[in-house]
Image (spheres, grey):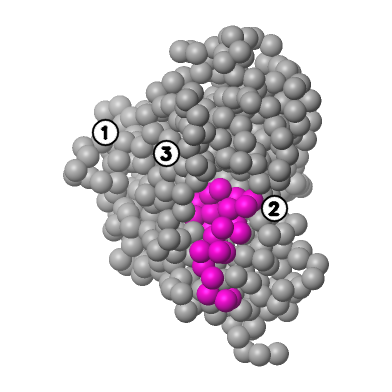
Amino acid sequence: MPREIVDRVEMPKQSPEERRSNFREVALGLDPELAVREAKRCIQCKTKPCTKGCPVEVEIPDFIALMAQGKFREADAKIKEKNSLPAICGRVCPQESQCESLCTLGKKFTPVAVGALERFAADWTREHSPESGCEKAGSDGPAVCAAADGIERPSARVAVIGSGPAGLTCAAELALMGYRVDIYESLHETGGVLRYGIPEFRLPKAIVNQEVDYVRSLGVRIFTNVLVGMTLDLNEMLAKGEYQAAFIGTGAGLPYFLEIPGENLNGVYSANEFLTRVNLMKAYKFPEYDTPVKIGRRVAVVGAGNVAMDAARTSLRLGAEDVKIVYRRSRTEMPARLEEIENAEEEGVQMFLLTNPVRIISDGKGGVGAMECIKMELGEPDASGRRRPVPIPGSEFTMDVDTIIIAVGQGPNPLLARATEGLALNRRGNIEARDEYGATSIPGVWAGGDIVTGAATVISAMGAGKRAARGIDIWLRSQS
């Protein structure tokens, strides 16, 4: 077998010593030569198993074949037939557990670097051949696209609540079908978790802006600083006939806590609050932005998902000298991407595994002075399928810290759900989806992403938005 099939191209990165003190993107991207070389590793197998691992159904071998020919603009267009946010997915999608895990080449060698190629195609197009969306026309706002599938559709307007990955995807899909779409975002900036939850060094805000602008170019209108459920009532929006359908993609922004003594001390953050202050309030641009975020010298981040890694690595960049991840299970059970764990360790983050906080100790001045922990061991699997952590009696110890960031998950924001009469929720407070498309208990209203499933990945939220757009389209055509 040729050598080019064996050796996977590795993404260039900033060195750990350099990157731990700046917020520039860690992964530097491929150049054209490396992108073509990696694309040529794809063996173009007939069964295309990689496509089965893509929640948004990108025809992966087809875009890679164009990449191998140096047709980068065409490759980006091929991706956008299924995925309106390729520059984002190429950076934060867990390809290793989805499309790349099913790559035929990966059975004997390393799989094709699908994410790196997707990122390159999107970035190259932005820099060399920016793409515009649909033509504008009509007197009542932006015009709609001509549906590529040729299906005649009713003249309808759809409201999308939330401009995160689910909302942006649903809006783009509907616009491409020929519907008029308005997005309502409660914050002053678009992007949802893409903007406030993911650090600049993993997903630059310029990339989020680029992807949002593309969705706008499809004719989608976006209204910020509008909190549906408070300033607007969803049922009234539908009853007045302004909108014929709606999609809810408000995400999971309600942080969970440990419920241990001392969590109310100064210096204890939820990861949601901490990352929002850094990202949305631009603390990463200090001293240009004097954002109220205080980081001590010794930081403990409780949790081991991607959010925990983001919080730990951000703490380093804000000046913390000692940063620890505290996790009650072992390395095998850590939910973060392996790449993010490795990046964190390379930058100096320490892993305290099989360790669980018991209480937070005051410094006597209302702040954090230390954290008492207990060592754990793994027992039988629990409901999540992971082995249950069990405390080891007598193993308590004190960890010297002055800042604690809690990153143990998030739940659904209750504002819209509680304010919308007739919207059924499950026992966890998530919106209840009644079919594969995300139909809710209110006729004409769909929901998807973290508001339905609980906190998950960007790409899974995008998949939900895509499915909901199909459900909305089927329903609207049945009503005409």
Residue drawn at the location 66% of the way across and 75% of the way down = 42
Residue drawn at the location 25% of the way across and 36% of the way down = 291
Q: Amino acid at mark 2?
A: Glu
SS for dot 1? loop
User: What is the number of the mark on residue 292?
Assistant: 1
CB atoms of marks 2 and 1 within 8 Å: no
Please indicate, yes or no, whether residue 328 appears anywhere in the rendered image: no
Residue 156: x and y, percent?
A: 63, 24
Query: Alpha carbon of mark 3 to alpha carbon of mark 1: how far?
Result: 15 Å
Q: Can you identify the residue that label 2 sits on?
A: 57
Q: Is residue 38 above or below residue 467?
A: below
Residue in the foreground of this view, choosing between 101 and 420: 420
Q: Can you identify the residue that label 3 sits on?
A: 196
Q: Amino acid at mark 3?
A: Tyr
Residue drawn at the location 79% of the way across and 71% of the way down = 46
Q: Earlier in the sequence, mark 3 or mark 1?
A: 3
Q: Is residue 247 left or right of residue 14?
A: right
Q: Residue at the bottom extreme?
A: 2
Quarter in which the C terminus is drawn:
top right
- Circle 3 residues within 10 Å: few <14, some 14–19, many ≥20: many
Q: Amino acid at mark 1?
A: Pro
Q: Is residue 69 above or below residue 376?
A: below
